[in-house]
Image: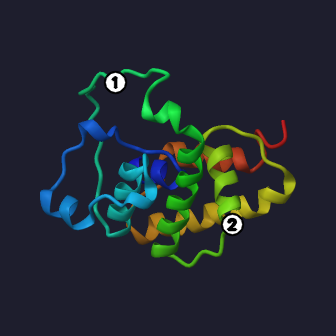
């Protein structure tokens, strides 16, 4: 499910708890253009290269959430960066012609439950087909969560 969660604009792994190959991490590195979202950017570029991610079912980390955290202080910037990362990842794997605003609205609605209008609905359907193509190209079976999102887009939750 880590790939589908990432393609929906969420960070699929808790960064302080990841383990990975040192060579991959060094080759990809962090990019400053995605300040405060460097982990998601790294995961997206790794996925585009064909790196597989696995999440263990055990809880390995206690993570304290508070109002002074980086995520709380930079929430708006992080949300727009999520859209740019998803767009960049999609473009690196398949041919997409989405605009930042469309991807941003997609991430906000599909991943965070914000409502969409009829105009966005057609784009979302096309974008979800593109994500399916990416998953297929990477040899990843669509997760149950992704299938539920596709059903949601088919009519449930739109403009309600």
User: Total number of numbered labels?
Assistant: 2
Q: Quadrant for residue 139, please give it.
A: bottom left
Q: Residue at x 51, y 76 (%)?
A: 94
Q: Residues within 10 Å of mark 2 (few under 14, many from 20)?
A: few
Q: Residue at x 70, y 59 (%)?
A: 101
Marks 1 and 2: in contact by CB < 8 Å? Answer: no
Label annotation for residue 63: 1
Q: Position of residue 75 (x, y in %)?
A: 55, 38
Q: Nearer the viewer, residue 82 or 153?
A: 82
Q: Quadrant for residue 46, please give it.
A: bottom left
Residue at disc 2, secondary structure: helix
Image check: 85 left or right of 148? left
Image check: 72 left or right of 150? left
Label annotation for residue 123: none
Q: Which residue position holds label 2?
A: 126
Q: Nearer the viewer, residue 116 or 55?
A: 116
Q: Residue at x 26, y 37 (%)?
A: 16
Q: Quadrant for residue 122, please give it.
A: bottom right
Q: Residue at x 62, y 50 (%)?
A: 107
Spatial separation of the CA atoms under disc 2 and disc 1: 36 Å
Measured along the vertical axis of the image, is residue 47 above or below residue 17? below
Measured along the vertical axis of the image, is residue 68 above or below residue 117? above
Q: Position of residue 65 (x, y in %)?
A: 43, 22
């Amino acid at each position: 499910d880590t790939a589908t969660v990432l393609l929906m604009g969420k960070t699929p792994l808790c960064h302080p708890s990841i383990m990975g190959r040192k060579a991959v991490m060094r080759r990809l590195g962090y990019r400053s253009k995605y300040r405060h979202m460097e982990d998601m950017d790294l995961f997206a570029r790794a996925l585009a290269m064909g790196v597989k991610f696995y999440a263990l079912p055990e809880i390995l980390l206690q993570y304290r959430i508070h109002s002074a955290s980086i995520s709380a202080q930079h929430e708006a910037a992080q949300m727009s960066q999520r859209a740019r990362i998803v767009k960049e990842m999609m473009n690196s794997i398949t041919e997409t012609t989405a605009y930042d605003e469309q991807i941003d609205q997609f991430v906000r609605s599909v991943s965070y439950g914000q409502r969409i209008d009829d105009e966005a609905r057609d784009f979302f359907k096309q974008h979800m087909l593109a994500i399916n193509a990416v998953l297929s190209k990477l040899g990843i079976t669509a997760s149950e969560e992704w299938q539920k999102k596709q059903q949601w887009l088919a009519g449930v939750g739109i403009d309600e």
